[in-house]
Amino acid sequence: MAIQKGEVAILTLGDRTIELPIIVGTEGERAIDIARLRKETGLITLDPGFVNTGSCVSAITFVNGEQGILRYRGIPIEELVEKSSFVETAYLLINGRLPRQKELNRFRVLLNDSSLVHEDMHAFFQHFPRDSHPMGILSSMVTALRSFYPDLEGLSQSEEVNITLTRLLSKVRTMAAMSYKISRGHKIVYPREDLSYCANFLNMMFDSPVRPYHIDDDLVDALNAFWIIHADHEQNCSSAAVRLVGSGRVNLYAAISAGTAALWGPLHGGANQAVIEMLEDIQATGGDCEPFIKRAKDRNDPFRLMGFGHRVYKTYDPRAKIMKKIVDRVLPKVQSDPLLDVAMRLEEAATRDPYFLDHNLYPNIDFYAGIVLRAMGIPTNMFTVMFAIGRLPGWIAQWKEGAADPNWKLHRPRQIYVGRPLARYVPIEDRDEAYSAEACSYNAY
Ligand code: ACO
């Protein structure tokens, strides 16, 4: 692994100085290595939200938020969208290099062979309440997969991991389409051997005995691009969850289920659904974006413009640029979408507004994702599931990289305790107002 060392940072603590190594990645990113800090000084670092903290070294994905760069295994995302398929990109992320033709064929065959879901699992899907959120169902069902596909005896660890990850990539897609069909009370459509990964998904979602689904190559291409640009994004919230939970040495299914749960939140993967809901609100209140922009700028109002801003990108999200092009390709395929007009007006108004410019808030991937998914006919409550299917290769690659590290440590952050100092147990009859006020006066927030 190419990590340059040599330079050091000097930390002065009273009359003591200690040297902390600086490590440099292959793209020139620099980090102060504090692995020995507590041992040598008794101090820890405090960094809420890990805004300045690297949790690992990784060779999977490179992001430069200032310049708007995203590369998987060194290859720019724009090139992958133009030349690759989602299945090939998944192979690249998970194995570290592009597959040769024979390897890609084999991977496709394995995905096809793994695409059925155990019939006994259908009963689980049938018994979730009809209005359950698909992300909750998906997260539970990924954990349940482990019970249906337990340890594979007699195989090496890497063989077992390869089979498990292929199962996940293939079955999660089948399960997502299954849960949609069941939620509508319709018959499940099984995967077909003659269809590609993306075409199969669209067919499982929309084919019906009374209205056979016509597979549109442009929509298949759009879905390929959609999933490629979602496939990884280094140590984002859900991938960090996969690594953290995985570091406890749980099985891969449980780690992926944790990633799915993390992705559900509206500040992360749930934003694509939140964007559409916000656009619908704007439209329902007459279509004027200004009141929403005003609310987003008001510090006393928790409202934010969904689909704007990013922890890492302080310029236009490169994925949003690609997504905008996909919008142009898919929209002629469908009836005009009034929400698109609202989205375009909102984008124009927000990207001219000094507040958004000063705060480096640009449209992110989720701003356009919802429009693309609507054009494909995907229901709003399944948007985050679409993100999850796309992010699977990244989660798997991050987990695999962690597991291959001989020093994969249990992730266990520390804290600074600011609570009540040593206190005595107060008998219940003595717990008066003064007791409550004193005890609560130490609460952090
Ligand atoms: N609308 C209005 N103001 C915003 C927005 C927004 N969407 N995002 C950030 N800000 C403002 C904050 O109010 C804050 O202002 P202040 O410094 O004047 O107090 C400043 O920008 C910094 O905000 P933070 O929350 O500290 O930035 P952070 O990096 O933690 O947040 C996040 C990133 C969570 C994505 C944020 O921009 C946000 O909530 N966006 C809306 C939700 C969204 O679109 N999420 C999808 C992200 S992409 C993805 O996960 C695939």
Image (cartoon, grey):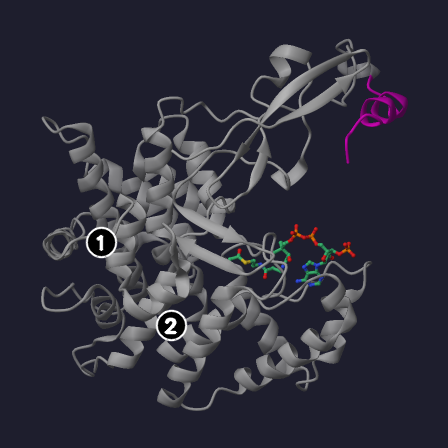
Mark 1: which amino acid? Ser
Secondary structure at badge 2 equals loop
Residue 216 is a magenta residue: no
- Residue 20 lies, with reference to residue 89, above or below; the image says above
Mark 1 to mark 2: distance in Å?
19 Å
What residue is at 63 percent from the left and 59 percent from the top?
Answer: 314
Q: 123 or 214, which is in the foreground?
A: 214
Q: Where does the image place residue 52, in percent across and percent down from the top left?
A: 64, 39
What residue is at 43 percent from the left and 44 percent from the top?
Answer: 259
Labels 1 and 2 touching (C-beta < 8 A): no
Q: 341 or 264, which is in the foreground?
A: 341
Residue 443 is a magenta residue: yes
What residue is at 82 percent from the left and 19 percent from the top?
Answer: 431
What residue is at 73 percent from the left and 61 percent from the top?
Answer: 359
Question: Which image quarter: residue 434?
Answer: top right
Q: Where does the image place residue 83, in percent across and percent down from the top left?
A: 29, 68
Q: In this picture, which residue range is highlighted in magenta?
A: 431-445
Which quarter of the rendered picture does the N terminus lie within? top left
- Residue 439 lies, with reference to residue 306, above or below; the image says above
Position of 337 with respect to 361 (left or right) is left
The image quadrant where one finds ligand 1 is bottom right
Mark 2: which amino acid? Ile
Query: Could you classify mark 1 by the number of other residues whose Cα lies within 10 Å: few (under 14), some (14-19), or many (20 or more)?
Result: many
**Label 1 CB-ligand 1 distance < 8 A:** no
Foreground tag (1 vs 2): 1
Question: Which image quarter: residue 109?
Answer: bottom left
**Residue 170 numbered tag:** 1
- The single residue placed furthest to the front in the displayed view is 6
Question: Which image quarter: residue 132?
Answer: bottom left
Query: Could you classify mark 2 by the number of other residues whose Cα lies within 10 Å: few (under 14), some (14-19), or many (20 or more)?
Result: some
Residue under pointer 2: 378
Q: 194 or 401, which is in the foreground?
A: 401
